[in-house]
Amino acid sequence: MLRPSSIIHGLRSVLAGIMKRILFLFAGFLAVALGLTDAGAQIYPDRPVKLVVPFTPGSPVDVLGRVIAQQLSSRLGQSVIIDNRPGAGTSIGAKAVAAAEPDGHTLLLTGTNLVYLPELYRNLEFDPIRSFAAIAMLTTWSHALVVALSVPANTVAEFIAYARANPGKLNFGFGLGTTPQILGEYFKAITGTDINSVPYRGGVQAISDMLGDRIHMNFGTTATLLALIRQGNVRALAYTGVTRHPDLPDVPTVIEAGLPQLAFDPDVCIGLLAPAGTPAVVVDKLNFAANESLKAPETLASFAKLGIAPKSSSPREFAAFLTEEARKWPPILKASGVKPE
C-alpha cells in the first residue's frame, strides 16, 4: 500500500515534468517570435518607401523632405519616394498615412500643426497622437512677420497703428491649417486689428501674392522669406523666436516688439511618423537612419540654406514633444478666434 507521502511526492514529480515541458515550449515559441521579429527588421524595407508630404511642392517642408528622402534612401537601401498631398490643413496627407499598412513603407513628414488639426476640422477620421507612431524629430523653427512694401510701417507698433487706422483694408495671407495661420489670427486678436484673412493651399502662394501687393501681412519661414527680405522685396518687422534669428540680426523678436504672447520656442517642429502599430524594430531602424541622415554634410549644407538646424531625437522623445504640443496649442487657437470647419 502506497503511503500518502509517496503519492504526494509522485504528483510533485509529474507536475514538475509538466511545468518543464510548458516552459520549454514557451521558450521555443519565444525564440521563434524573436527570430521572426529580428528577421523582419533585417529585411525591412523590402520595397520602395513612400514619404507623404502634406505640403505644396517647393514649400520649405517639401524641400526638407526631399533632402531627407535622399539620405534615407542611401541608408535603407531602397528608394524613398516623395508623395505630395497638400490640402485641408495637411489633414489629407495625414489621413492617408494613418490608414496605411503599418509596415514602415508609408511615412508622414509633417509639423506641429498635426496636433491641433482637431481644433480646425470636425471630422478628421484619425487621432493626431494615437493614429501615429513617432519616429524622429528633424528640425524646429520659428517665423518672421513681414509686410508688403506698400504698407507704411517699419516696426510692429507702426503696423498695428496703421492697421487700426485702416480697418478692413489690409489682407493677411496664409496656408490653410498651418502655423502661420494661427500666428496671424492670434496677432489680430491680441492687437485688436481688423485685417482680412485670405487662405491659400500653401504659404508660398501667399508670398507670391504679397509681391503683387494683394497680400499685406504674412508669417513665414526664413527659408521662404530670407532672400526676399535681403533683396528688399518685403519688410521684416519681427521674429517669433525667443531670440533673434542669426540670419536676421537686425530684426527684433516679438518680445522686443512688445508682443510676448507671440513668442514661441519653437513655433514648428518637423518630424517623421508612421501609422500606429508599426513594429518597434522598424521604428527604431527608421529612427537610426533619420538621425544618421541629420549628420550628413549634404544635409547640414541644405539645412543651412533653409536657415534651419538639425534636431535629432529618440521616438519616445518625439512622441513626448508632440503630446506636450497637443496641450499647448488648443488654448492659443481658441484665443485666436479660429473656428473649426
Image (cartoon, grey):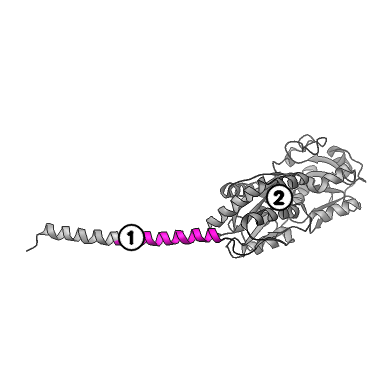
Image coordinates for residue 205, horizontal then vertical, percent = 83, 56
Q: Earlier in the sequence, mark 1 or mark 2?
A: 1
Image coordinates for residue 107, horizontal then vertical, percent = 64, 59
Which residues make up the magenta segment? 21-47
Q: Residue at x 45, y 58 (%)?
A: 34
Quadrant showing the C terminus:
bottom right
Q: Residue at x 57, y 55 (%)?
A: 283
Image coordinates for residue 134, horizontal then vertical, percent = 60, 53
Q: Is residue 40 magenta?
A: yes
Q: Is residue 88 visible?
A: yes
- Residue type, label 1: Phe
Q: CA distance from mark 1 to mark 2?
A: 57 Å
- What is the magenta segment's predominant secondary structure? helix
Cβ–Cβ under 8 Å for marks 1 and 2: no
* Element under disc 2: helix
Corner quadrant of residue 209: bottom right
Identify the residue position indicated by label 2 in the image. 333
Q: Is residue 267 visible?
A: no
Corner quadrant of residue 253: top right
In this picture, residue 224 sits left or right of residue 341:
right
Q: Residue at x 78, y 58 (%)?
A: 57
Identify the residue position indicated by label 1 in the image. 24
Image coordinates for residue 310, horizontal then vertical, percent = 68, 44
* Element under disc 1: helix
